[in-house]
Image: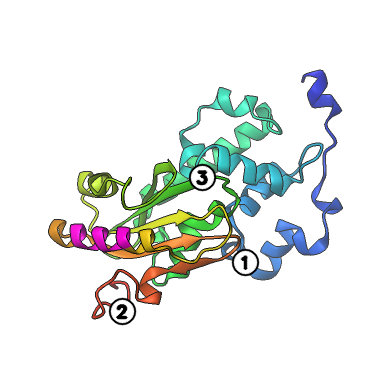
């Protein structure tokens, strides 16, 4: 352990306000009610000077583009992340590997999309802390169960810059019959712009040509989101709900 690591002040779960303690929330509401950051916080257990354990978890998710990025990060790189070290990095890698093995062993256990809220919970809840725009694609199987989340763009996201073929590239490669698209507004206002609507129109048309359903396009703001399908923006009026 370095001198800097020894100087960290570790904020424990007990020192957090009761309504912010992830373990208490899990006990009262169940694991599904927790964000990805809160679930990671339970594994990490302690924060560092200037950051609660939830802050540390949120930072890791942002820096590594969510859970898929963390899963791809090698052990040595995780050990170098502020607030981790070998013990916490080992716990994190073990938890992510268990999740991967469960997904492979039990496809039916993968989260299923029935509503825009499901899409947000699976692929968008950690986007609220991003200070740049990102565009993500959630790949889904024939029963709308999550297969993978892919981050395609970081920076400005609009119909003039997004290549539609790239949005569908992984779905075509993995033979995924449906996708959902998410991007965030760093301003915190999730109101869809005219460019967001234009992009949705292009994606719907491309999906129809490829035989891949676009279930929804979510715009994520500060602790809230908007569903363009729910708002009737960019989707054919006859299509009012995600395919079951």
Which region of the structure is painted magenta? 198-207
Q: Secondary structure at mark 2?
A: loop
For label 2, the residue is: 240
Residue drawn at point x = 26 percent, y = 58 percent: 203
- In reply to whether residue 84 is colored magenta, the answer given is no
> Which residue occupies the extreme top position in the image?
2
The residue that label 1 is drawn on is 30
Residue 15 screen position, x and y as percent: 86, 51
**Residue at 37 percent of width and 52 percent of height:** 158
Question: Looking at the picture, how far across and down is residue 57, in whole percent?
Answer: 65, 44
Decide if residue 235 is in sight here.
yes
Which of the 4 image quadrants contains residue 207? bottom left
N-terminal of the two: label 2 or label 1? 1
From the viewer's perspective, tell me whether residue 194 is left or right of residue 69.
left
> Could you tell me which secondary element the residue under label 3 belongs to?
helix
Disc 2 residue crowd, few under 14, some 14–19, many 20+, Cα 10 Å: few
Going from N to C along the chain, the mark reached first, 2 or 3, is 3
Residue in front for this viewpoint, 175 or 97: 175
Q: Report crowding for label 3: few under 14, some 14 to 19, many 20 or more residues within 10 A (C-alpha).
A: many
| Residue 81: x %, y % from top left | 64, 29
The majority secondary structure of the magenta stretch comes to helix
Asked whether, in this view, residue 9 is left or right of residue 159, the answer is: right
Magenta segment includes 206: yes
Q: Does residue 227 lie above or below 133 as drawn?
A: below
**Is 99 rendered above or below residue 118?**
above
Rounded to the nearest angstrom, the CA distance separating label 2 from label 1 is 31 Å
Residue designated by label 3: 66
On screen, residue 109 versus residue 78, left or right, reads left
Distance between the Cα atoms at labels 3 and 1? 21 Å
CB of mark 3 within 8 Å of CB of mark 1? no
Residue 98 appears in view: no
Q: Is residue 117 above or below residue 87?
A: below
């Amino acid at each position: 352990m370095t001198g800097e690591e020894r100087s960290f002040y570790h904020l424990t779960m007990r020192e957090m306000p009761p309504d912010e303690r992830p373990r208490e929330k899990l006990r009262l509401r169940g694991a599904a009610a927790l964000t990805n950051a809160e679930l990671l916080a339970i594994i990490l257990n302690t924060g560092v000077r200037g950051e609660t354990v939830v802050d540390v978890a949120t930072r890791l998710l942002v820096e590594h583009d969510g859970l898929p990025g963390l899963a791809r990060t090698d052990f040595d790189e995780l050990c170098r992340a502020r607030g981790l070290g070998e013990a916490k990095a080992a716990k994190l890698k073990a938890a992510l590997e268990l999740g991967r093995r469960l997904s492979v062993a039990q496809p039916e256990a993968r989260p299923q999309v029935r509503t825009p809220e499901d899409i947000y919970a699976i692929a968008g809840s950690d986007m609220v802390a991003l200070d740049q725009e990102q565009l993500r694609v959630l790949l889904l199987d024939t029963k709308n169960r999550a297969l993978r989340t892919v981050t395609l763009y970081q920076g400005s996201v609009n119909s003039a810059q997004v290549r539609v073929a790239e949005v569908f590239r992984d779905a075509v490669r993995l033979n995924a019959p449906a996708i959902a698209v998410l991007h965030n507004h760093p301003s915190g206002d999730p109101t869809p712009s005219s460019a967001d609507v234009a992009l949705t129109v292009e994606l719907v048309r491309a999906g129809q040509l490829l035989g891949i359903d676009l279930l929804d396009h979510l715009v994520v703001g500060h602790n809230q989101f908007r569903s363009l399908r729910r708002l009737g923006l960019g989707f054919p009026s006859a299509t009012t709900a995600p395919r079951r």
